[in-house]
Amino acid sequence: AVVPYATAPLEAEFVVLPPLGKLEPNGHLEATEHLFEGDLIGPEALVVDSTGSIITGLADGRIVKVFSKDDGQVTYETLGRTGEEVEGCGADIELEHICGRPLGLKLSQGGKTLLIADGYKGLLEMDLASREISVLATEVEGGPALTLPNAIEETEDGTIYLTDTSTEVRRNRIFWAAISGKSTGRLLKCRRDGGGKCEGLVTEGLFMPNGIVFDHDRRCLLIAMTILGEVKRYCLEGPDKGVMTTFAKNLPGTLDNIHQFTEPKSGKKGYVVGMGAKYAKPFSLLNALQGFPSLRQWIIGLPVPYELNYKLIPPYGMLGFLDAEGQLVQTLQDPTARTSWLSEGIVVNGSLWMGTWLHPWIARRDFTGTVAEKALAAAFE
């Protein structure tokens, strides 16, 4: 008989995760619409252009723009693809390396171009006028090639910071990275004139770094750590320059993308982070398995469909809102899990738009004047 432990493609390590906290449920996301169901699969990252349109990347490799027509009807158009268009794109995860899988997005050069972190194709840039896509980097100077490029931030001088979530697994095996407990993630520095390579390693040994955003002073980068329930801070200037510290901890979910957020009523600054799954009492599978690396390695080696990995995790819908000091002040939740596996949330023209790395829709909820907005206003007072 074949022993799954012996045939596991990835070795698991001992890992210490934060204790499970208590989460008070609310239903602020239950009244959410799912738009273009079946057409937009896995719209993970959302960026807003100067017209208020939303640009997102999909599991089938497409980059699309969602916008309102003159009559107010919401529609979308395809801007391009990061990979090839073949039958099964978006439906078969084993085709992602062919189809492409755009993850992190960032508008650049005054909104004329779109930076794309594709989980297989590397760091890309799309000219939004010509819609041509060029490759900026697939390699890393002095280190392993880009393996799971995930999220992007850019300085005013054009320096690009990129999270590489793992140096051992690709996007279509990301749950193996979570189960393994191995800290092989990196923060990289790249430039357009790098000759196809990111120029250097900023820091390594990170456990699944994911979303990235500047703080409101643009002095430090905030990095969402997928499994640890933490947001790390890495400063580019000031007294903490070059030092990685913890900005937020013991958050009640697995983290995805992070955005700046300004509370509309008070104008107070903060951040919103997508939480893909609940990490709170009474139970979390990842927490329960943390002290058993042999069991986790056995799970990785099981000859079962890969999708079973995430189907073992109970779905939940949640966005977390942090204040300027990194304290969690409010969550918006859907305990029914109808709107679950959320990757991020942004407020545009009075609506809260939400992305998901898994589901075949983009989500929208009325925000201005709703109970959800009032709950956030009270939390930021």
Image: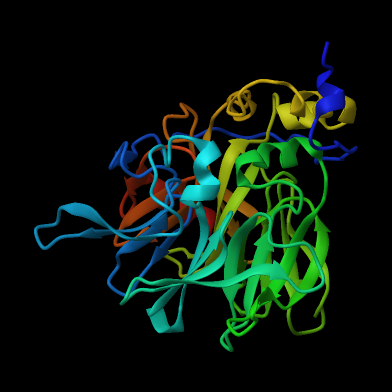
Residue found at x 89% / y 38%: 13
Residue found at x 11% / y 63%: 70
Q: Position of residue 292 (x, y in %)?
A: 88, 27
User: What colour scheme was applied to this rendering of the protein?
Assistant: rainbow
Horizontally, is 131 left or right of 199 in the view? left
Question: Looking at this rendering, what residue extends furthest in the top direction?
Answer: 1
Between 29 and 122, the residue placed more toward the observer is: 122
In this rendering, is residue 138 above or below 354? below
Q: How many numbered discs sit on the rendered protein?
A: 0
Between 270 and 315, the residue placed more toward the observer is: 315
Question: Looking at this rendering, what residue extends furthest in the bottom direction?
Answer: 157
In this rendering, is residue 288 above or below 175? above
Horizontally, is 130 left or right of 258 in the view? left
Q: Quadrant of residue 53?
A: bottom left
Between 286 and 183, the residue placed more toward the observer is: 183
Question: Looking at this rendering, what residue extends furthest in the left direction?
Answer: 71
| Residue 184 seen anywhere in this rendered image of the structure | yes
Q: Position of residue 254 (x, y in %)?
A: 65, 42
Q: Quadrant of the N terminus?
A: top right
Q: Position of residue 348 (x, y in %)?
A: 34, 61
| Residue 323 seen anywhere in this rendered image of the structure | no
In this rendering, is residue 252 above or below 50? above
Horizontally, is 13 left or right of 47 in the view? right
Q: Quadrant of residue 236?
A: bottom right
Q: Position of residue 192 (x, y in %)?
A: 58, 81
In this rendering, is residue 355 above or below 291? below
Between 249 and 182, the residue placed more toward the observer is: 182
